[in-house]
Image: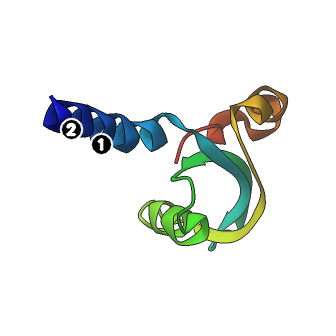
Amino acid sequence: MKQLILTLTALIALTLPAHAACYVDYKAKKDDPLRLHYGVAEVACGGDAYGELADRLAANGWTLLAIVSNFDETGLAERQDSAANYFLRF
């Protein structure tokens, strides 16, 4: 019984961080011709948001210029119109 309780507690502890959502809004560019965009992306909470997002953008030909801010799901609605096509795209 003790083993079962410990196992269940460990499983619950491992699944809790997966439900937390973290987001950033950012600015990125492409050269030749110069194109800029503002976007919103979901990132791993507590991780290297800059590196994670820079890799995703680079895979699509974009260069991350800056992360503007970090926020949770409560900040999504107010940024959706500004990010337009780049809302949760990368």
In the rendered structure, find residue 7 and report the number of the disc placed on it.
Answer: 2
Of 4 and 10, nearer the camera is 4
Residue displayed at 63% across by 73% down: 31
Residue displayed at 69% across by 32% down: 73
Where disc 1 sits, the SS reads helix
Check disc 1 and report the residue beneath it: 10
Where disc 2 sits, the SS reads helix
In the rendered structure, find residue 85 and report the number of the disc placed on it.
Answer: none
**Residue 79: which quarter of the image?**
top right
| Label 1 close to label 2 by CB (< 8 Å) | yes
Of 20 and 69, nearer the camera is 20
**Residue 54: which quarter of the image?**
bottom right
Q: Where is residue 40 in the image (x, y as percent from the top left)?
A: 67, 45
Q: Position of residue 5 (x, y in %)?
A: 24, 32
The 10 Å Cα crowd at callout 1, few under 14, some 14 to 19, many 20 or more, is few
* Amino acid on which disc 1 is placed: Ala
Residue displayed at 64% across by 42% down: 86
The 10 Å Cα crowd at callout 2, few under 14, some 14 to 19, many 20 or more, is few
Give above or below for 78 relative to 21: above
Residue displayed at 69% across by 48% down: 39
Judged left or right of residue 59, residue 44 is right
Give above or below for 47 relative to 6: below
Of 43 and 29, nearer the camera is 43
Residue that extends furthest to the front in the rendered view of this protein: 2
Colour mapping used in the image: rainbow
Of 14 and 65, nearer the camera is 14
Between the residue at mark 1 and the residue at mark 2, the CA separation in whole angstroms equals: 5 Å
The N terminus is located in which quarter?
Answer: top left
